[in-house]
Amino acid sequence: MAVTKKKAVRKAKKGERIRQVAAIPFRLTADGDFEVMLVTSRTTQRFIVPKGWPMKGKSGRKAATIEAQEEAGVLGKALKKPAGTYSYWKRLANRFVRVDVIVYLLEVTEELADWQEARRRQRAWLAPADAAMLIDEPDLSTLVKTLKLPDPVPLGQA
């Protein structure tokens, strides 16, 4: 993954937009609504969704699934169609760059008690409107607040 990040930084230095992939983990509630999972960032502890750099040889959907496992400790299946996109400013060593993020919904089938970044992150299940209020990035907040699951949710068929 580090090779891809280096490539993205090189593109950013040339003024090119760079891309990431993200997952919004979700689960259905007993009353038929749904909740989304947010995680805290490693450095600032702000609430975000699991995201990362594209991975060589893997689809965006697969990379988003891997990021969700590493950062949020959840297993599941990403829905085939992206849920949307958002952009944000990423802090690099000596500058900020604009990053475009493709977001996939991830149907959570299992929550791990221990995972790769468990000691560095917290996670929380929230209604989308509540989650949106905790997110600092305006574009991501809007995406989460207006999130709709496909009708019907293709559970187990992602």
Image (cartoon, rainbow, N blue to C red):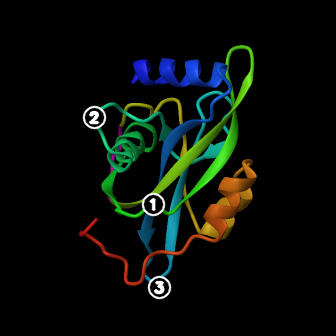
- Tell me if mark 3 has few (under 14), some (14-19) or many (20+) residues whose alpha carbon lies within 10 angstroms of its own: few
Q: Does the magenta stretch include residue 134?
A: no
Identified at 61% across, 46% down, the residue is: 48
Quickly name the residue at label 3. Answer: 31
Given the image, on which type of amino acid does mark 3 rest?
Answer: Asp
Q: Is mark 2 on a helix, strand or loop?
A: loop
Q: What element carries label 3?
A: loop
Quickly name the residue at label 2. Answer: 57
Which region of the structure is painted magenta? Answer: 109-114
Q: Is residue 112 magenta?
A: yes
Quickly name the residue at label 1. Answer: 82
* Image mark count: 3
Q: In which quarter of the image is residue 13?
A: top right
Given the image, on which type of amino acid does mark 2 rest?
Answer: Gly
Foreground mark, 3 or 1? 1
Disc 1/disc 2 C-alpha distance (Å): 19 Å
Look at the image and tell me in which quarter the C terminus lies: bottom left
